[in-house]
Amino acid sequence: MGESRLKVFSGNSNRRLAEEICRTIGVPLGEATVTSFPDGETFVKIDENIRGHDVFIIQSTCPPTNHHLMELLIMIDAARRASAQRITAVLPFYGYARQDRKDQPRVPITAKLVANLLVSAGANRVLTMDLHSQQIQGFFDIPVDHLYASPVFFEYLAKTQSQSLVVCSPDIGGMKMAAAYAEVLGASLGMVAKKRRSATTVEAINVVGEVSGCDVLLVDDITETAGTLMAAATMLRERGARRIRAAVSHSILNEVAYERLKSGMIDELITTNTVPIDTKGLPVTVLSVAGLLGQAIQRINTNESITSLFRIKGF
């Protein structure tokens, strides 16, 4: 048995997740120097031979987004110039995903620009999780493996199932996701109509569906300020909802979000470790996606199907 051709490296955005992924697949995390010069420029040096290897570079493009994106691009370039056989960019969280269309005049489609940058840097393949919109996969002319965190959520939710559960989307865009959760959990489906006032302020307008006396599960793919979740939870409480929990794939919580979560309007925020998260003693449950991503990396490496990773245990 010769040396494994699989090599996994990590930038600085979520090293703990990268280490956990490596533990689950029994591969050491590759040695690489990823630092900044005094002027802020990123310096990368891969400290081991990767010639002819199948290289996976794990980096979530979470805040500081531009810094972490540049780290990833420079690491990909370094791997390409070191003669890696194949380079897979692993983005547990794909930043800029919300800028995926021209919804007003003279704005960019930054999600497409990021896709172009990854390919230009030398990525041969992308592995990501819970994209804000599915069509971002079409922005790439290289293979994209798109995983869902839902199996991890379902496994956790199965332990705490409620008799009268309503799965609610906090906006129209999340209805498809909410419908999938409702079907698996055998729950009713609801929706909160909202109007966005600014990047941090959201106003809930109406609730579609019966929630009085029910436990509500809000599902969303990303939260930053928790504005959408809070507006939805406030209106659901007014309509008589009993217990409100939220399942969110990517929680990039800022100080505004922590203050809002302190209000107790949401009984539990269930999220994943696609981005580093500090619970600050709040009712935040962090589930690990390391097992899912690790299995996907192994299967890509051995050219196996990753379809079975979408199957849900216990349902």
Image (tube, grey):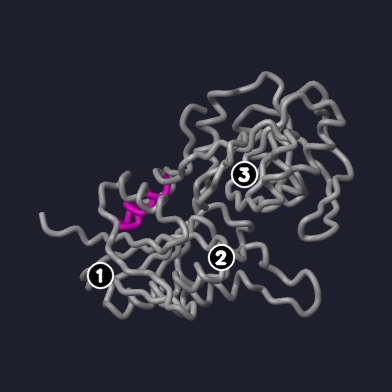
The quadrant of the picture occupied by the N terminus is bottom left
Q: Which residues are magenta?
A: 292-304
Q: Mark 3 or mark 1, which is nearer the start of the sequence?
A: 1
Q: Residues within 10 Å of mark 1 (few under 14, many from 20)?
A: few
Give coordinates of residue 34: x percent, y percent: 37, 69
For the residue pair 235 and 134, the one nearer the viewer reads as: 235
Q: Which mark is residue 64?
A: 2
Give coordinates of residue 199: x percent, y percent: 77, 60
Q: Mark 2 or mark 3, which is nearer the start of the sequence?
A: 2
Q: Kindly identify the amino acid type of the residue bearing the numbered disc 2.
A: Pro
The residue identified by callout 1 is 47
Report if the CB atoms under discs 1 and 3 are less than 8 Å apart: no
In 3D space, how far apart are the residues under numbered discs 3 and 2 (Cα atoms)? 20 Å
Q: Residues within 10 Å of mark 3 (few under 14, many from 20)?
A: many
The residue identified by callout 3 is 248
Residue 301: within the magenta? Answer: yes
For the residue pair 132 and 180, the one nearer the viewer reads as: 132
> Residue at image x 57%, y 41%?
279
For the residue pair 291 and 78, the one nearer the viewer reads as: 78
Choose mark 1 or mark 3, whichever is in front: 1
